[in-house]
Amino acid sequence: GQSLEQPSEVTAVEGAIVQINCTYQTSGFYGLSWYQQHDGGAPTFLSYNALDGLEETGRFSSFLSRSDSYGYLLLQELQMKDSASYFCAVKGSGGSYIPTFGRGTSLIVHP
Amino acid sequence: EAGVTQFPSHSVIEKGQTVTLRCDPISGHDNLYWYRRVMGKEIKFLLHFVKESKQDESGMPNNRFLAERTGGTYSTLKVQPAELEDSGVYFCASSRQVDEKLFFGSGTQLSVL
């Protein structure tokens, strides 16, 4: 079968750093994506890792370890507007490019 | 450039009724996807169109769901007859190429009472 595991909720304060982990078990793997969704809004693409290592885009970074079937999203200098749900998604499950999504992590940023 | 638009944003219907959801993808995006999220669960894949053709409908739950994409532009997803377990948020997404990132709409919140 296939599964993605990520924490259901993470809480942090403004200005802090938070890491959202994602472990996956899929029958194939091309890469790991992260999407952000604010309440009632559209999920929006944040990052994609096909190779091991860290990808940095501004305050957000994403890491992948293919040997460990593990990745994380790192958010630095947290702002209130970062409060949202964050989904990891695997491409390649069953040989398909269509992303398979996890259950999402609700990030709550407190002042 | 307009994003992916979905209509309606909310729909409340009674069990046994019919509902049709519409999705307008980004212009020029041949790939169109339908996903569904039931509260607290994963965003689950339903089906994938390439232009007007159904490429993969392995996620469609049963034959009460019918998706179409006439002319390869907008798509509709009809649920007939609706059941209680069909409640959730139905997302549409599009991409230019199948291996590129997805652009999502804001979803249709379907409540079946």
Image (cartoon, rainbow, N blue to C red):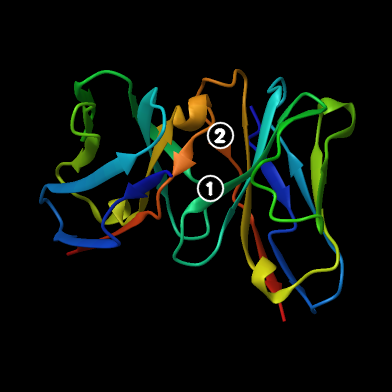
Q: Residue at x 72, y 81 (%)?
A: B113
Q: Which chain contains the residue that carries disc 1?
A: A
Task: Say which quarter of the image contains residue B71.
Answer: top right
Q: Secondary structure at mark 1?
A: loop
Amino acid beneath label 2: Phe
User: Relative to A57, does residue B80 appear above or below in the rendering?
Assistant: below
Residue at mark 1:
A42
Where does the image place residue A18, in percent across and percent down from the top left?
15, 49
Say which chain tag 2 marks: B
Residue reaching furthest to the front? A1
Residue at the location (39% across, 36% down)? A26
Proximity of marks 2 and 1: CB atoms separated by less than 8 Å: yes
Image quarter of residue B97: top right
Badge 2 marks a residue whose secondary structure is: strand
Q: Quadrant of the C terminus of chain A?
A: bottom left
Q: Where is mark 2, residue-wise? A: B103
Q: Is residue B77 left or right of residue B32?
A: right
